[in-house]
Amino acid sequence: MALDELLRTLEHEAGTRMEEVLGRARAEATALREAADAARTARREATLRARELELRAAAARELEAARRAATRRVLEARAAALDRVRRATEARLAGRAGDPALLPRLRDELADGLGYLGEGPVVVEASAALLPDLRRAMNGRPEVTFVAGRTAGLVLRAADGSLVVDASLETRLDRAWPALAIELARRMEEDR
């Protein structure tokens, strides 16, 4: 019987040992599955975070591009509006080239311009409609020649070309335009 008893004890110990080994293997397999699940979850979350960052960056780039495009359109529209204002102003100035209401100012500017040019032959360009009145303002100064031009205002030239006094309204607009454009743009921005 002792042999039977020994066999049963060995079988029992082997069964117990097998259950322990199986239990540890199952626990280890469960731990490995949980670790793999946790690693997979961590990788998924990291991938999602990375993708979210990519999408946010792409959205920020698109938003910035849209802002730049909108700003460009506003600036182009403002430039077009300023161009229309400038063209309308130039047309109005051209329309006033022969306006007799300019005569008092033109007479003063003629005297000032002649003062800059000094003695000697001078050519004065002005609107043909205003030339007779401007000639009379010279009291017959013989070295001044008047020629018809298309400009509103006066352009005085030394006959030798050494000096030009441009008192035309067009030139004044050219000089004043940068400051006027800034002021007009500021007002447009306020109205917007």
Image (cartoon, rainbow, N blue to C red):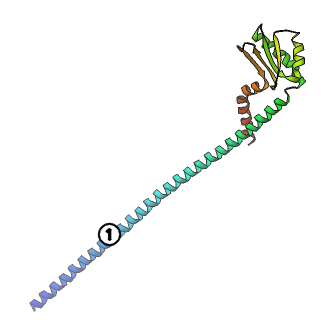
Above-or-below relation of 59 to 109:
below
Q: Is residue 98 left or right of residue 36?
A: right
Q: Crowding at label 1, few (<14), some or many (≥20) Cα neighbours within 10 Å?
A: few
Q: Residue at x 77, y 35 (%)?
A: 87
Residue 25 is drawn in which quadrant? bottom left
Q: Is residue 5 left or right of residue 164?
A: left
Coordinates of residue 56 in the picture (x, y in percent):
53, 54
Above-or-below relation of 47 to 130:
below
Q: How many marks?
A: 1
Residue 11 is drawn in which quadrant? bottom left
Residue 74 is drawn in which quadrant? top right
Q: Residue at x 67, y 41 (%)?
A: 75
Q: Residue at x 52, y 52 (%)?
A: 57
Above-or-below relation of 52 to 168:
below
Q: Nearer the viewer, residue 127 or 83?
A: 127
Q: Residue furthest bottom?
A: 1
Quarter holding the N terminus?
Answer: bottom left
Amino acid type assigned to the residue bearing label 1 in the image: Leu
Q: Nearer the viewer, residue 21 or 114?
A: 114
Coordinates of residue 171 in the picture (x, y in percent):
75, 25
Q: Residue furthest left?
A: 2
Coordinates of residue 106 in the picture (x, y in percent):
84, 19
Q: Is residue 109 left or right of residue 163?
A: right
Above-or-below relation of 27 to 55:
below
| Residue position for label 1 | 32
